[in-house]
Amino acid sequence: MTMGSSSSQRLADLARLRRVRDRIDREYAQPLDVEELARGVHLSAGHLSRQFRAAYGESPYAYLMTRRIERAMALLRRGELSVTEVCFAVGSSSLGTFSTRFTELVGMPPSSYRREAAQAPDGVPPCVEKQVTRPIRNQEAPVLRHD
């Protein structure tokens, strides 16, 4: 294999991974799983997971859950929906799994987050709020692997 063909293969692989990431960003509320995402770019689930983790630092499942939690945070801040309604609105099918993952990434349960958000002062621009409240994996929380 020549150097040119390996670099063009690397670019093709990165383009596939970007398509997967973009699909997760767009369809986070849909029932997505790694097998379905892999089929969409003609890879095996294991190969996609390894490549995605190498490129983005987390598995496709972890990335999907982070997108869902980001959206859940925004919905909880608005205060119009219950925690259960938010769970299902962002595509989670289990309130327990949603609450556990939310707590891992945000550092508090969704009900506490909703309560605190309701007491926060208004007037923070949404673009600033989104950046400041972006979920970052809670380093003390155990990392659950769902690859």
Image (tube, rainbow, N blue to C red):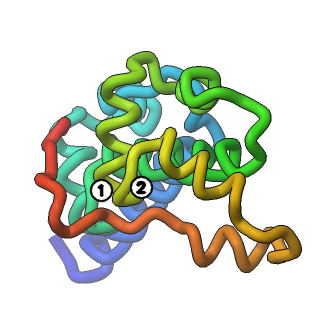
Kindly identify the residue that appears in the image at 27 percent across and 64 percent down: 138
Q: Toward which corner of the image does residue 88 lie, by quadrant? A: top right
Residue 30 relative to residue 81: left or right: left
* Label of residue 101 in the image: none
Within-10-Å neighbours for mark 2: few <14, some 14–19, many 20+: many
Kindly identify the residue that appears in the image at 56 percent across and 53 percent down: 70
Q: Position of residue 5 (x, y in %)?
A: 29, 71
Residue 128 relative to residue 62: left or right: right
Kindly identify the residue that appears in the image at 79 percent across and 34 percent down: 80
Q: Toward which corner of the image does residue 122 lie, by quadrant? A: bottom right
Residue at numbered disc 1? 52
Label pair 2/1, CB-CB below 8 angstroms: yes
Q: Amino acid at mark 1?
A: Phe
Quarter holding the N terminus? bottom left
Residue at numbered disc 2? 17
Quarter holding the C terminus? top left
- Circle 1: element type: helix
Q: Position of residue 140 (x, y in %)?
A: 16, 65
Residue 29 relative to residue 137: left or right: right
Is residue 33 or residue 95 the one in the foreground? Answer: 95
Is residue 59 or residue 103 the one in the foreground? Answer: 103
Q: CA distance from mark 2 to mark 1?
A: 6 Å
Kindly identify the residue that appears in the image at 77 percent across and 74 percent down: 127
